[in-house]
Amino acid sequence: MNEHKILEMKQISKSFSGVQVLNNVDLSLYPGEVRALAGENGAGKSTLMKILGGIYTKDTGEIYVDGKLQDISSVEVAKELGIAIIHQEIVLVQDMSIAENIFLGREHSAGYGLVNFRKTYEETQKLIDRLEIRGVTPQTMVKELSISQQQMVEIARALSTNARIIVMDEPTSSLTDSEVTKLFEQIRQLKKDGIAMIYISHKMDEIFEIADRITVMRDGCHIMTESIADTNYDQIIRSMVGHEITDYYPEFRAQPGDVILEVKNLTTDRVKDISFSIRKGEILGLSGLVGSGRTELAEALFGIDPIHSGEILLNGEKISALSPEEAIKAGIAMVPEDRKDKGLFLTNTINFNMTITVIDRLISKLICNKEKEKKMLDSYINQLHIKMANLEQSVIELSGGNQQKVVISKWLATEPSVLILDEPTRGIDVGAKSEIYHLMVKIAEMGVPIIMISSELPEIMNLSSKIAVMCERKLVKIFDLAEETPTQETIMHYATGGYRNEKK
Amino acid sequence: MKKSDTGNFARNNPVGRFISRNAMILSALIVMGIVLSLISSSFFSSANVLSVLRQASTNAILSMSMAMVLIIGCIDLSISSSLALSGALCVIMINNGVPIYLALAVTLVFGAFCGLLNGVMAAFTDIPPFIITLATQQCFRGAAYLLTDGRTIMCYDDTFTKIGAGSFLGIPVPVVIVLIVLVIAAIILSKSKFGRRMYAIGGNKSAAVYSGIKVKKVTVIVYVLTGTLASLAGIVLCSRTYSCQPTAGTGYECDAIAAAVLGGVSFNGGVGTAGGVMLGSLVIAFLNNGLNMLHVHAYWQTIAKGIVILIAVFFDTMKVEKMRGRKV
């Protein structure tokens, strides 16, 4: 890579109301390079990218594009320089077609303020062909596309601006494994065309697969830049966290006790004929591809989906959870997948969020038992190490890891018999992930069995005492880790439906 | 650390909390008071203040009723029409010899029923509450015309007119009613389990479902409360004007929204206090009164009111932006 640098950011600093978020950060890119950008939440990655994209302006420092000093003062300037940013959340207009979305804001003109649709569709078709997006036409509505296809449209939009530097902010967070593979094929294609990419991700295996070099940031500073071949997992984690994480996954030996939850031939609209059981002290890892019915199974147990047939036994008693309220009463607690959407009241206080499930116990005849409330809150805050200013702080101000702890504590407060965690570590940085793992083991050891749904196989493999694999809305295999230790490949084999060939 | 000390004071002390939450609108009220009393010496006379409060009572009750639905993230545009319909029903019952207290009770139950209709539709269908209540607004208004045959009906029943014109310990009865409504609403919102559930639903409906809150049930009950308060406002208005009119209250739902939003209720739900709403409706009342005293033409008054609402909401959204931008 002795070509010229396509991008050089030198000594970039930025502070917000007196807080230094970036401190003399350097970053340079060569054409055709994929650069992983890693760091915990709050390390300054997104701020740096927003400066590159013209959303924020830097306080000090210089940015060179193609060796020329540039003043990226607005998003328009960044676009003209060939810089495109694909944000983590998809920002497409759902009710418009692919073509309309790609050329939104810079429509081809047919004169008199009218849109030249023919040209728009032609250009879009070229992009679709180039990226090999299958099964769509320029006129297809965005809302009809899968998430990965929408991600592709975002990339097409970036390409249509003749971008030479593309920033992807956690592009795989909502993609399935096969979709990730497709995305990587496209990234390799773009590399050949000499396009430089900055790839922000928390997922190490992806970084090792796709990136050429990695830059790690911490607390607004550049910590290291290293060729992927010359570094390793431990070094990256150490750089991100600032210290060694010795026991990233806690030691966990399940001591199975009595059967707590037993599910027999459970069928709903969205899952078919599910049977399994979980004992006291166990962690059941529920694996499978996105859309395989994992969340749907959890929602059936939690009373969100009506049950057509089969039964649920909790502590030996049959329960028929018709609503979440009844499920909670029976002793089932569920931390939903989407923390912000389904788990939290973001603008309300920590106190409000933690007590909302148990207000029946705290408030009687309009009088809130402050003493009991404080005792309960204190105990969870200490056990879970929730970092916050005070209980009246809005949860929106907390980091992802601390938000997740608030959700977990709100459910522990209900003193459940079984706790369901749906993707408990999504969008949480490495240090906080490890804390959540330790917390889960502690909860299991206290006697509350956990059903953990996760797309991250290492999580499933390291924490579970049993692994259940789902495929196409059925539970296809249960591994008891006391008896056998499946490999990731074995689990994927079942999750992708490979078991069918076996039967034949 | 001094700053955070005063912060703690504001949080832990109910009066301090009230002041810090409503700092903006309180200062607006004070500034208005000072300016108006400088311009007109009669402004701070007890006669003027009491008459302003008496006039403001209808809007105050309606604002509280609107605030309830806004807090759960819904809206009720029909309250102005159910006010007219309930008022008409009440006056006609009294004129036809129904005992006054029975008539009042029936009217309130009828208001609750109007709210129930809205609530059931809002909770059990996917039609947006804005559209549901826009439709029922038309229906209730039409029913009011039918009931009154399109005419103003007078009512001189002594007990009835006392509700609007009488005084209790020197305080106008409508103001007493407003105070009672305020206290009950404040208790529901800030002290009760039901109130916390309301904030939860308005704050994040799916999180509320996942927390085991019966969202539909709470929604219906809140609409019933809203409808009941609307009919109470109807009774007060009719009694104050000795009559019922099919056109009564037209456009009042907008004033109610304005007062609630001025008082810090979020249009997106989940935020707002009873005290704030009351301050909001006071600001609107004194704004009207002050502009009257300044001999500002009624048409210009309406424009002024609109501008005040825009400014207030603008500052409110700035506050939310700031909060979202700030993360640990």
Image: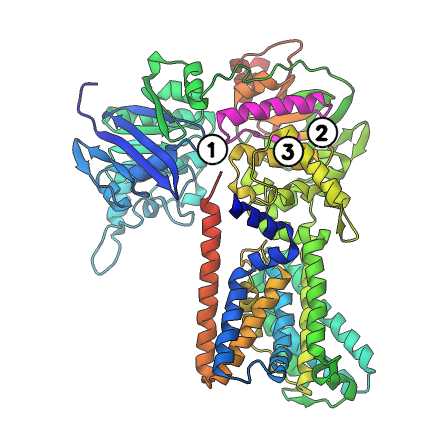
Q: Nearer the viewer, residue A206 or A402?
A: A402
Q: Quadrant of residue A37?
A: top left
Q: Classify the position of the C terminus of chain A by image quarter.
A: top right
Quadrant in which the N terminus of chain A appears: top left
Residue A381 marker? 3
Nearer mark to the viewer, of 1 and 3:
3
Please say if A419 is above or below B67. Answer: above
Left or right: where does residue A339 sit relative to residue A360?
left
Instruction: Answer left or right for B68 relative to B1.
Output: right
Q: Which mark is residue A418?
A: 2
Give the residues drawn in magenta, as a range.
A420-449
The stretch drawn in magenta includes residue A177: no
| Residue B200 point in image, percent of width and height | 63, 49
Asked which quadrant contains residue B275, the reply is bottom right
Residue position for label 1: A174
Residue at coordinates 54% horizontally, 76% vertically from top-left? B286
